[in-house]
Structure formats: C-alpha cells, structure tokens
Image: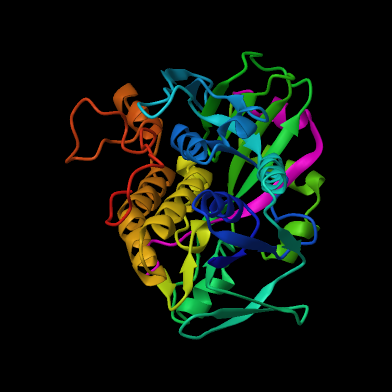
Amino acid sequence: MTTALIIGGGIAGPVSAMALQKAGIDSIVYEAYPTGADDVGAFMTVMNNGLDALRAVDAEQAVLDQSFPANAVEFFSGTGKRLGEVPIRGGSAGAHGPHTITRAGLYRVLHDEMQRRGIPIEHGKRLTGATTTSDRVVATFADGSRAQGDLLIGADGIHSITRSLIDPEAPKPRYTGATTLCGYATDAPVDPRAGVYRMIYGKRVFFAYTTAPDGRTWWFVNIPGPELDRQQLADTSPGEWKKRALDLVARDKTSASAIIEATDTEITGSNGYDITSTPRWHANRMLLVGDAAHVAAPNAGHGASMAIEDGVVLGQCLRDCTTIDAAFTTYEQARRTRVEQVVATSARMGSTAIPSLTKRIIRDLVLPRKFKKGPRNTASWLTGHHIDWDTTMSSATG
C-alpha cells in the first residue's frame, strides 16, 4: 500500500491525510512545532466552499460544532456613516455560509479528527531535506531522524521548506506591507447581534469585528509598517500592539477605539504575505499543497478554504490516477487556475478604497465575480465551488 509523508500539521496537512485515508492511502503527518502550528492566537473564516470540501471527507460537522456563522457584512466609513449591508449566502454547494473559528480551534478539530481516524502525527519534526529515488522518498528532520515513504506532500505553510526543495529558485513570499492584529474584547460597547461582520474603512486603517455567541467581540486590524521577523512578533507585547492600534483609529468616529480599549491581553500579530504564482508545484515524488503552493493575502479570507480544497482534490487524484506523477500533474491542472485567481482577487481587495464604492461594488467584494465562461445563474465562482468525492479525477475536472 502507498504511504505518504505529509509535512505540516496546520490545515492542508490534516485534511490531505483524511482524504488520502478515504482513498485507501496511508500517511504520517510530521509537525515542526512541539504541540501545534504557529499563529494560534488568530482567527479565520471557513467559507462555504471550504465546508463543502470538508463534507467530502466527512469532517464538516466537527468544524461547524466549534465555530459560529457569519450571516452578513455591514460596512462603515471612518466617520461612522453606515455604507450598507450585504447578506452572505451559502452558495449552491451547500446550506452553510462562512463560519468563524480560531486558528487554534481549527487545528484542534482537525487533529482530533485525525486521532479519531487513527492517522498518526509526530510533533517536533522540522523538515531539513529530502532525497528521492525511482520509487521512494526519504525525509530528514532537524532532530536527526529520517522517514521514508512513496511520496512527500509539502503542507508546510507560507515559508515552506518543501517548496525550496522542489525548486531552489522558487519565489519567496512577498510581504504585503501590513501586520494583521487579531484581538478578543470582553464587554465591548457594540451591537450585540451575533454572526455579522462589521467592516470599518477608517482614515488611516481598516478595522473589522464580529460578535461571538458568548458576547465577546472578535476583531482584527491591518497595521501598515515594515515586516517583522518571528522574534520581533513574539517580543511585541499585547500592550504595545494595543497602543499602536489605538493610535491608528484615534481620528475615527467609530466603535473601533472602544473595542480595542476593552481588550486586555488577547492580542496577537502576524505578517501578511502573498505569492503571485509558484512555477513548480511538484518534482519527482514531492508535491505542494495549501500555502506551500499558493499564498494569498488575507483580504479575501479564503486561505483556509483553499487549503482544505487542495487536500481533498489531492486525495481524489491519488485515488484515480495510475501513477504518482500522473496524480500530481492532474492535481496541479485541477487547482492552479482557481487558486491563482483567488490570490489575484485577494490582492485587489487589499488595494481598494472603500469610501467611494457603490453598494454594487461592495457586494462584489463580498461575493466575487462569477467565472466569465460559466452560466449566468450559477453561484459565485469562489464560494459556490463544489467538490464531488465520487467524481473521477483522471483528467483536470476539480
């Protein structure tokens, strides 16, 4: 039986492992961190298409149980003027719209699912190299250990080691010019309606928040500035982040200042990156999935959903193709156009000035344009994407 070495235990890695298991392929997940991946203080949305992909591997309900829905987006200017509200629909692929969950919560759900299904994971395994032969791949780790299998799946994130092993000339992630802060406020004086995202386009900064079912306010703000390395991010205290955020929203007449003030120590920062295109997704017996293959700025909120889709489609390709090389080629053909369009869409959203937008353009930002070649009455090309596990992937149909 084929055995896959999966490098990375964030999102793409565990989903790939579940999809491979459903396809009859064994795998072992190797996670660099002792207990979990980095950036665990952040939160994210899993979109309808991500939930649809999870449904294909019977993992949707586990995520729904640990998240809460987002039903609408409400827009405000920095003066406090309400610009409009747009409902978020689930799309044709399923009944669920976006769901909000902490990154740590999503990791925990996916790891619990792997454990329940008997999929092994080894922590403290940072990949340093890999060698391939005609029928095997051998991975080496920083602790001196080695592992061998039939293929290696690089799900090791934005700063992927696997990407550089496949192609030493691969492009580096581009810093987008902003650090995203995620915070959690208790007793903030805001509209208590749960399940609505409020997006504020202030004079100096973009700020957004939503209310969780327990009444806490989850917020994020994009702070422009130079790129910070891992140590600088870790050394910046919540108090420092709080002061910087307050300075940037001080001139706005919105609820942003009150929300930040109501936040105590639960603030974390992470850099924003993207890669327009990664030329080589696979070589020999190694392949990239998730952020290792394609990095989108966080503006469109689809990073997690794209990683989930990747893992499921890869499982289908390995199930249906007669060779590993054919499976890798089919996977890339099935995924590249879609994910690169997401990267481009997210970049455009990050550079758009909201105060002058009409309600139609605001709607298009939340529910992006349909494929030009698709039927006029289909759901959004982005959120309405559907993966049918029973579809044969002997050609690029995903």
Report the front residue among 398 and 157.
398
Rendered-image quadrant of the N terminus:
bottom right
Query: Residue 93: in sight, yes or no?
Result: yes
- In the picture, measured across the screen, residue 165 lies left or right of residue 183, that is left
Judge whether 172 appears above or below 216 on screen.
below
Stretch of the chain drawn in magenta? 254-280
Query: Residue 280: in sight, yes or no?
Result: no
Colour scheme of the picture: rainbow
Residue drawn at 49 percent across, 71 percent down? 172
Residue drawn at 47 percent across, 57 percent down? 295
Judge whether 281 appears above or below 70 on screen.
below
| Image location of residue 353, percent across then percent down | 39, 38
| Image location of residue 274, percent across then percent down | 47, 58
Residue drawn at 59 percent across, 56 percent down? 13
- In the picture, measured across the screen, residue 43 lies left or right of residue 176, that is right
| Image location of residue 65, percent across then percent down | 66, 27
Q: Does the magenta portion include 9?
A: no
Residue drawn at 62 percent across, 40 percent down? 248
Report the front residue among 367 and 395.
395
* The quarter of the displayed image where residue 171 is located: bottom left
Question: Across the whole image, how many numbered discs are drawn on residues?
Answer: 0
Q: Does the magenta portion include 255?
A: yes
| Image location of residue 118, percent across then percent down | 70, 50
* The quarter of the displayed image where residue 167 is located: bottom left
Residue furthest to the front in view is 1
Judge whether 293 appears above or below 387 on screen.
below
